[in-house]
Image: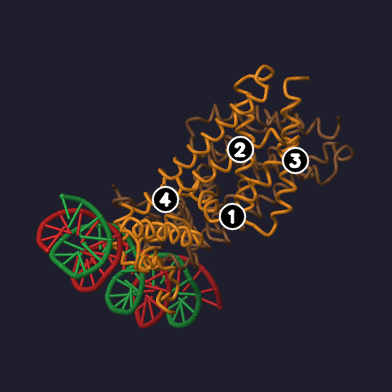
Chain colours: A brown, B orange, C green, D red
Amino acid sequence: MAQGEAGTAQETADPGDATASRAERKERTRRAILDAALALAADSNLAAISLRQVAKQVGVVPTAFYRHFGSLELLGLALVDESFRSLRSMLLDVWRHAPEYRDFIDGSLPIVAQHVRENRSHYAFIARERTAGPPRVREAINHEIALITRELSTDIARTGAAEQYSPEDIALLADLIVSFVVTMAERLVEDPDSEERTLAEARTQLRMLLVGALNWRSR
Amino acid sequence: MAQGEAGTAQETADPGDATASRAERKERTRRAILDAALALAADSNLAAISLRQVAKQVGVVPTAFYRHFGSLELLGLALVDESFRSLRSMLLDVWRHAPEYRDFIDGSLPIVAQHVRENRSHYAFIARERTAGPPRVREAINHEIALITRELSTDIARTGAAEQYSPEDIALLADLIVSFVVTMAERLVEDPDSEERTLAEARTQLRMLLVGALNWRSR
DNA sequence: CCTTTCAGTGAACGTCTGTTCACTCAATAC
DNA sequence: GTATTGAGTGAACAGACGTTCACTGAAAGG
């Protein structure tokens, strides 16, 4: 109330505050636009929100939007990029620490869950737009997921399972695991209150899956 | 061109054609509205289309919509109902014939794939709205999936695995299978041209999963 | 110090939105 | 044969939509 003039439902960029370079102020507005779109899309989805709603939420005039993004779709692609940049750095962390744990499930799942908890709106965005977003956004998300699956494949192969299993089977296993984790993440996003239960169940299910992998073609 | 006056992009209900009871004509328009919404939502999603677009596609005036549905959300719930009514009858068929097959995977997967192929727009609708639809629609879909999972649980238990595995583990296995099939259906919808490949991969993955189940807690 | 750059402004446009209301007129009910 | 019902009509509304354009004024560049 002091200076921000937080309107009816605004979350103003407030790039004022006197001292700030031009680039800083621009970046701050850009962030505000991304956050506003993320918040608005949370109640429906990207294709259902309007440029004007985003501008109003940010606290700028509609035309100002075009200084940052050419369209809502490009904004969506930026959000995909941002989401997966964060996700990938988390996965790097998981895979770097993985060998330390006797059971990599117990080591990895809580980290993933924590990341979902701390980046709920981004995960919700990805979960929605993966199936319902504009075609280019869907493509971008599926491509990112495919990349992650590929990385998991090579990581599984590195654990020494390379001679026992065919590359095709390893790829299928990696896909199975990634698909399952995607489903789990969707559930954590949809019902955050049941995180503990969801996680406990996922742990058991992932173990079932790995028991299958361990007994695969070794009978 | 003879009598239908099929406009620029209409798919007219055409409830004329002279002889037809009042109820029949109403039902025909209702169907046309459902189909129009299904077609329009295919290019984005339910929350992004408008009542007027649907009406124009059907070939009626916007206000006529209200004679059939109170809102687009209620139309969405009707589509969910319709989709799962068809899906459940297919599943009944699968489960009725399942015992005949030595390997129930090879018996069931093609039937599911065929059903997806023949009802692509409904499956696409469910896939999108499950994560991106209006809250009530999401709820309805997740509820239907939960019901199917429950039925699969009791079916697994009936196969005689009831003494070897705990009810909780059976439920988790059923959930794992249903989740996987949902993912597979999403892929069949997204990329129909790769059906054969998707199906072959899913077959192997489902086997991996079942190998896990068979070796579960029996070591 | 003067010039250029450019994030943000504000008016204006034509179009589309959901919803209301009183209406028509053929199929049904009695 | 008359009365009722109700699916579909068409005008009207207030507001939101994307996009254009010429603009302002402070920061950055020279």
Name the chain letter of the residue that bears numbered label 3.
Answer: A
Mark 4 or mark 1: whose residue is earlier in sequence: 4
Q: Nearer the viewer, mark 2 or mark 1?
A: 1
Q: How busy is the neighbourhood of tag 4: few (under 14 within 10 Å), some, or many (20 plus)?
A: many
Q: Nearer the viewer, mark 3 or mark 2?
A: 2
Residue A158 percent across, percent down from the top left:
83, 40
Tag 3 residue: A173
Amino acid type shown at disc 4: Gly
Q: How busy is the neighbourhood of tag 3: few (under 14 within 10 Å), some, or many (20 plus)?
A: many
Query: Residue B76 — which label?
Result: 4
Residue A103 percent across, percent down from the top left:
73, 27
| Residue A62 appears in view | no
Answer left or right for C9 relative to A112. left
The residues tagged by marks 4 and 3 sit, at their Cα atoms, a distance apart of: 36 Å
Indicate the quadrant containing the C terminus of chain A: top left, top right, bottom left or bottom right.
Answer: top right
Name the chain letter of the residue that bears numbered label 4.
Answer: B
Judge if badges 2 and 1 mark residues of a common chain.
Answer: yes
Q: Nearer the viewer, mark 4 or mark 1?
A: 1
Amino acid type shown at disc 2: Val
- Examine the rendered structure and indicate whether residue A117 appears above or below residue A44: above
Tag 1 residue: B118
- Examine the rendered structure and indicate whether residue B136 appears above or below residue A35: above
Amino acid type shown at disc 3: Leu
| Residue B155 appears in view | yes
Q: In the image, what residue occupies the spot 37% across and 69% down?
A: B17
Mark 2 or mark 1: whose residue is earlier in sequence: 1
Q: Secondary structure at mark 3?
A: helix
Query: Residue B178 — which label?
Result: 2
Residue A81 percent across, percent down from the top left:
59, 55
Judge if badges 3 and 2 mark residues of a common chain.
Answer: no
The residues tagged by marks 2 and 1 sit, at their Cα atoms, a distance apart of: 20 Å
